[in-house]
Image (cartoon, rainbow, N blue to C red):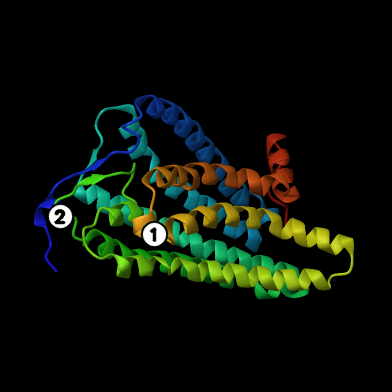
Amino acid sequence: MGRDNDSYQQAFILLGFSDRPRLEIILFAFILVFYTLTLAGNTAIILLSIMDARLHMPMYFFLGNLSFLDLCFTTSIVPQLLWNLWGPEKTISYHGCVAQLYIYMVLGSTECVLLAVMSYDCYVAVCRPLHYTVVMHPRLCLQLVTVSWFCGFLHSFFMCPQTMQLSRCGRHTVDHFLCEMPALIAMSCEDTILVEAFAFALGVALLLVLISYGMIAAAVVRIKSAAGHKKAFNTCSSHLTVVSLFYGTIIYMYLQPANSYSQDQGKFLTLFYTIVTPSVNPLIYTLRNKDVNGTMKRLLKGEKGAKET
């Protein structure tokens, strides 16, 4: 399969929203606000989960890792995006594009698996509450997070080279605001079925989520009391909301053929799950969470954040 060497040497042009100059100004302000919220909200979650011994539990350990992922995920995209929106310069070097794609995919793939891990934590909390502390011991939690990162790196290790080695027949204009896999695949002038098939690996993590929630639903049906139903709902509602927001956009973007991929739709969906979702995740987890809300109130009042032993 012939490769066009010139396309590997040239910088990429990220078109982004350059055909809508007025929209670029609005998006710059919009993204800057949501990025600030992402930094503040996720940093607060991380600090709270570390500072307060009351939050040294599996759920908050996973939540702290999710917040860290969201911080890194958004930061890997936003500075370049703001730079492109602010000025006329829309280029990114070939190696910069490769780095952005790799980091973006490592973090995104890791988050997919971590959300599956968190669904398992919800399953144990609802279906095996008496054995929760025994099953979800700290060593297992650390192992599950390590596996999430390993899967993220492994998926990116295979997908990034496959994507970047596609022949582009001299094309170096990316109809997107970042080097994202669907947009780069859409540039190719060769058969991309094999590369697209690898994207379905993300479906394995989603399948684990669905299995966990299927077992949770079966357990909830067997619960007779209204109090038991409410407790199960409170345990799972935040995570289920985050999963729906994250996987909903991922599925629509990645699990559709490249020939039916709409660039305009893709841009706004990418903005949603890379900018908006990470900023609202802390809000979703804190609105109904008495432990986190209590910790925030104690810290705001200047009380001690950890239990005395």
| Secondary element at image label 1 | helix
Question: Which disc number belongs to residue 106?
Answer: 1
Q: Are marks 2 and 1 in contact (CB under 8 Å)?
A: no
**Image x and y of residue 146, in percent:** 47, 67
- The residue sitting at the right extreme is 225
Q: Nearer the viewer, residue 111 or 4?
A: 4
**Image x and y of residue 238, in percent:** 67, 53
Q: Residue at x 51, y 36 (%)?
A: 34
Q: Nearer the viewer, residue 287 or 294?
A: 287
Q: Is residue 133 visible?
A: no
Indicate the quadrant containing the C terminus: top left, top right, bottom left or bottom right. bottom right
Q: Is residue 5 visible?
A: yes
Residue tagged 2: 169
Mark 2: give few (<14), some (14-19) or many (20+) Cα within 10 Å: some
Left or right: residue 80 versus residue 285 is left
The mark nearer the N terminus, 2 or 1, is 1
Does 150 sit above or below residue 67? below
Mark 1: give few (<14), some (14-19) or many (20+) Cα within 10 Å: many
Q: Amino acid at mark 1?
A: Val
**Image x and y of residue 286, in percent:** 67, 46
Left or right: residue 133 versus residue 25 is right
Q: Residue at x 44, y 64 (%)?
A: 149
